[in-house]
Image (cartoon, rainbow, N blue to C red):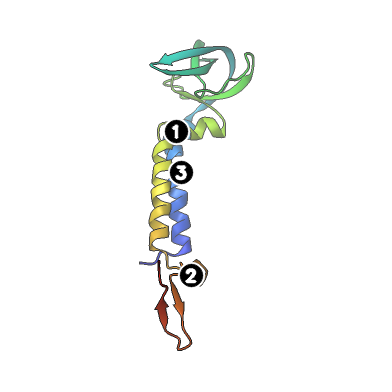
Amino acid sequence: MKISGSKFLIITILILLIPIYGNWKLIVHGEKTEGIVVKIIEENAGMLLSFYSIIAYEANHTQYTLKGPENVEYPVGKKFQILHLSEDPQHAIIYSIKGIYINRFTSVSVVLFILWIAFYLSFSPKSASRNSGKQKMNSNGEYRRKKLL
C-alpha cells in the first residue's frame, strides 16, 4: 500500500484541525469582548495541584468569569479578547491560538496524529539510505545475509 505525499499532507492537516472543530461555533458566530485577569486560583485534585487565571468579562450587561488554561499564570490586570456566544455568554474562550486550539479535542488530535505517523511510516517503502544493513549485495548482484553473532 502506497500513500502519496499529497494524501499524507491532507490527512495530517485534517487531524491537526480536529481541536478547532471543538470551537467552530464560537469562531464563526462568537462575539468579541474584553476580559481582564482578576485573580489566580489553585485547585487540588487528589495529589495534583493546578492553578488557573480567572478572567472576568461582561456580556449582555452581566459579569461572567472564565478559567484560563491550566497551569498558565497570567498577571492580574492582563487584558484579553474573549469570544462568547450571545445566546450563551458563559460558553467563552480566550481569542488566541492557545484559546482556540487547546480544548477537550486536543488530546484526541495528538493521539491520532501519532498513530497516523506510525501507520504511514510502517507502510512507506524503504529507500536505499534506510537499508538496515542486514543484507549486502555481492559481486554477482545478489543479496547475501549478514552473519550475526
- Residue 47 x %, y %: 41, 18
**Quadrant location of the N terminus?**
bottom left
3 or 2: tag closer to the N-terminus: 3
Q: How many marks?
A: 3
Mark closer to the observer (1, 2): 2
Residue positioned 44% across, 65% down in the render: 4
Mark 2, Cα crowd under 10 Å, few <14 / some 14-19 / many 20+, is few
Q: Which mark is residue 127?
A: 2
Residue positioned 47% across, 30% down in the render: 26
- Residue 147 x %, y %: 41, 72
Quote the CA–CA distance across marks 3 and 2: 31 Å
3 or 1: tag closer to the N-terminus: 3
Q: Which residue is mark 3?
A: 17
Q: Which mark is residue 23?
A: 1
Quote the CA–CA distance across marks 1 and 2: 41 Å
**Quadrant location of the C terminus?**
bottom left
Amino acid type, residue under disc 3 in the picture: Leu
- Residue 33 x %, y %: 57, 21
Mark 1, Cα crowd under 10 Å, few <14 / some 14-19 / many 20+, is many
Circles 3 and 1: CB atoms closer than 8 Å: no
Mark closer to the observer (3, 2): 2
Picture quarter containing residue 25?
top left
Circles 3 and 2: CB atoms closer than 8 Å: no
Q: Is residue 49 left or right of 33 when viewed as pictured?
A: left
